[in-house]
Image (cartoon, grey):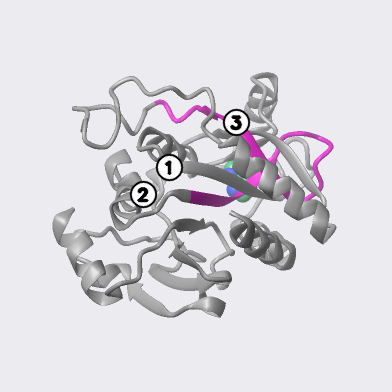
Amino acid sequence: MEKTVEYIKDKTKDFIPEIGIVLGSGLGELADEYCEIKIAYKDIPNFPVSTVKGHEGNLVFATINEKKVIMMQGRFHFYEGHSMETVTYPIKVMKKLGVKNIILTNAAGGVNPYFKPSSLMIIKDHINFMGTNPLIGPNDDSLGERFPDMSEVYTKKLRKIAYTCAERLDIPVERGVYIALTGPTYETPAEVNMVRLLGADAVGMSTVPEAIVARWMGINVLGISCICNSAAGISTVGLSHKEVLEAAEKAKVDFKRLVLEIVKNI
Ligand code: HPA
């Protein structure tokens, strides 16, 4: 960790990021538009490398409305075979670099039948259905406590800012519960029924481990899902990664506007 942080600090000098953004499937473009410093994951000592198409692998540093931002262009998923420790490693790096607020974004399937494809959802709460937890193992007391409270993973203040920004920009947003499954398979119709019964509005394969670790370390968390498709069984057609990327493409304009406005108002 020390080596990782030292390398990044050496490249970024006196740039101290306060806001972290993790860009999900097809949403990485935002980083390119504001990029000041770009570091490829593969050049950072001890940093993992992502393997999914549509997920680039860069840390991007940008100043947006005088706010210092670090963006992850591409994240690490449990289904890639990475350990939970690897999946959440960059979140710990962000904390060490100075991040106080984090925006986690993702592509997700809509489980709530009222959600339309290409809409945006502010995550109100989550269900960890990955069958494991990123905090299993010895606890690093210097980062957070052994039994962290999870009654408000997604910071109320940030959610409020997100709703206000969406309203001001006239961008319709949903709010709901995100459930994380491991993937890489999309859900069966029966599984979609199940997660709906469990109280989920959207289903995906990321974000929850990162949110848990960020919350544990005392970082304020905001989660935004791009509802790329109606999850299986709700939609009458089969699912493909291509369809997910196309929907992200459509939602991208609103997504970018919303995230920028939120950053300005944090
Ligand atoms: N299920 C799980 N993850 C997803 C989906 C989905 O339908 N769409 C985009 N990511």
What range of the chain is rendered magenta?
102-131
Question: Within the image, what quadrant is residue 121 found in?
Answer: top right
- Quadrant of the image containing the C terminus: bottom right
Residue 188 x %, y %: 63, 33
Q: Is residue 225 above or below residue 24?
A: above
> Residue 179 got which mark?
none
Of residues 239 and 40, the one drawn nearer to the viewer in this rendering = 40
The residue lying toward the viewer, choosing from 25 and 157, is 157
Tell me where residue 90 appears, x and y as whole percent: 33, 53
User: Which residue in the protein does label 2 denote?
Assistant: 91
Q: Is residue 118 visible?
A: no
Crowding near pointer 1: few (<14 within 10 Å), some, many (20+)? many
The secondary structure type at the circle numbered 3 is strand
Give the residue type at disc 2: Ile
Give residue 84's quadrant in the image: top left
Q: Residue at x 65, y 57 (%)?
A: 244
* Residue beneath disc 3: 125
Q: Nearer the viewer, mark 2 or mark 1?
A: 1
Residue 73: in magenta span: no
Quarter of the rendered structure image containing ligand 1: top right
- Measured in 3D between alpha carbons, the distance from the residue under mark 2 to the one under mark 1, in whole angstroms, is 10 Å
Amino acid type of disc 3?
Asp
Is residue 120 highlighted in magenta? yes
Amino acid identity at mark 1: Ile
Q: Are marks 2 and 1 in contact (CB under 8 Å)?
A: yes
Q: Is residue 214 above or below residue 179?
A: below
Q: Which residue is mark 1?
A: 219
Q: Secondary structure at mark 1?
A: loop
Q: At 41% across and 26% down in the image, what residue appears?
A: 131
* Res. 235 in view: yes
Whether 262 is drawn above or below 156: the answer is below
Q: Horizontally, is 26 left or right of 53 in the view?
A: right
